[in-house]
Image (spheres, grey):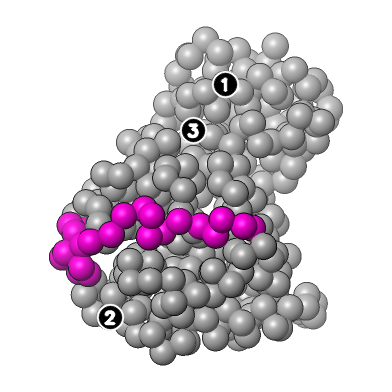
Amino acid sequence: MHEALAGLLAREAPIGRETWRSWWDELGAGGLDRAQAVGLLASLTSRLPDHDTLRHLLDSLAERRPPATVGGGPWQDTVNVVGTGGGPRTFNVSTASAFVAAAAGVKVVKTGSRAYTSALGSIDLLERLGVRPTSSYAQTEDVLATYGIAFAGPFVYPTQLTRLARTVAPLGMKPFGGFLNALGPFLADLPVTAQVTGVSAAAPLDTLRELAATTTTRRIWLTANDTGADELLPFAVNTVHGDQGATRVIRPGELTPGDGTFEDLRPATDPAGAVPHFLSVLDGGAGPVARRTVALGAAALLVAAGPGRDWRSAVALADEAIGSGAAADLARRLAAARHRPAVARA
C-alpha cells in the first residue's frame, strides 16, 4: 500500500509533498492498482484531511504543470466564479451571475464541472445552451477578449485527475463528487486576478478558508450563508470571507429586498426546459427573487475583480445588465458564435 493511502486511512497528519510526488509518479508509471486509487478517492471523499496535507497535495499537482500562460493582458482584473456544489437545489445561479457580471463590465472566466449532486452542472447547461468550453489558454484569451466572458474546459485541471479516472474505471468519478466539488475550486490553473467561490454546508468551510489564505496566485473570496447554499442569497444571512481574514456580512434587506424562498430559485422541472428557463433568469423573466439573487452574485464578482466598486453600486450595475437585456443577449451571442479553436500563435 502506498504511503499516501496508508496515511489517509490512518488519519496521520500531515502527508508531505514528497509523498504526494511519489503517488503521482507511481500513478503515471502504472504502479498503482485500481483498489489503491479507489481507496484514496474514497478516503478523501469521506473526510477531507488537514490543511497541510491538502496544501501539499495541491502543490504537488501545481508543480507538474508547465507555465502555460502569464497573467496580464486579457487576464488583467479577471475573476473566476466557481462553487463547491451541494446544498438546496436551485437553477445554475453562479453561471447566470457570470453572464450578468460580464454584461455589467467585469471580465469573467468560469470554471465548473458536470453534475455530481445536481440535475445539471454548469458544463451540462452550457452544452444545452450551445456554448462550448474553451480548450486552451490561447482560445480562452481570444474568447475573453471578444466577449468579456469565457468558460474554461478541462484543460485547466491537472492531468493526474484524468489518470485517476482511468484507473478507477469503470467505476467513474461521480461517487467521489464530495471531494471533487470541495477541492475543485483550488485545482483549476487560471491566471485570474480574483476568484469567488460559494461554499455549501456540505463542504468544510474552515479548511477551505485555510487553503484560500495560503494560495498566492490569486485572491480568493469564499461565500457562505445560513441556509447551507453555495450562493449569495437575498433572503439569507451571507458571509463573504475575503482577503487577509476580512469578512463582510450581508443581511436580508441590506442590498436588495429580503423576501423570497428557495421555491423562487427552483430549477426547470424538465431538463429540456433548462435553456429557456435560464434565459428567462438572465432577462429577469424568472421573477424578482431570481433577479435579485443573480444580481447579488454578479455584484460579488464586480467587487472582487478590483478596487473602486462598492457593493450597492455593483448590485445596481448587475440589475441594469439584467433589466436591459444585455446579459441574455451576451449568452445568445456566445452560443451563436460556437467559437472555434484559436489559431496557433507564433
Q: Position of residue 60 (x, y in %)?
A: 59, 38
Q: Magenta stretch?
A: 250-271
Amino acid residing under circle 1: Ser
Give yes or no for residue 58 being in the magenta stretch.
Answer: no
Residue 108 locus on image (x, y percent): 49, 71
Q: Residue at x 42, y 45 (%)?
A: 88
Up-down relation of residue 267 to residue 101 (above or below): above
Looking at the image, is mark 2 or mark 3 nearer the viewer?
A: 2
Foreground of the two, 19 or 162? 162
Disc 2 to disc 1, C-alpha distance: 45 Å
Badge 2 or badge 3: first in the primary sequence: 3
Q: Secondary structure at mark 2?
A: helix
**Secondary structure under the numbered disc 3 in the rendered image:** helix
Residue 43's disc is: 1
Residue 13, percent from left and from top: 45, 18
Single out the residue that lies furthest toward the bottom. 324
- Where is mark 3, residue-wise? 54
How many labels, in total? 3
Q: Is residue 243 visible?
A: no
Tell me if label 2 and label 3 are in contact, CB under 8 Å.
no
What amino acid is at disc 2? Ala
- Disc with the residue nearer the chain's start (2 vs 1): 1
Q: Which mark is residue 316?
A: 2
- Location of the N terminus by quadrant is top right
Q: Compare residues 257 and 144 and report the one nearer the observer.
A: 257
Residue 253: say if magenta: yes
- In the rendered view, tell whether residue 97 sits above or below residue 34: below
Disc 3 marks which amino acid? Leu
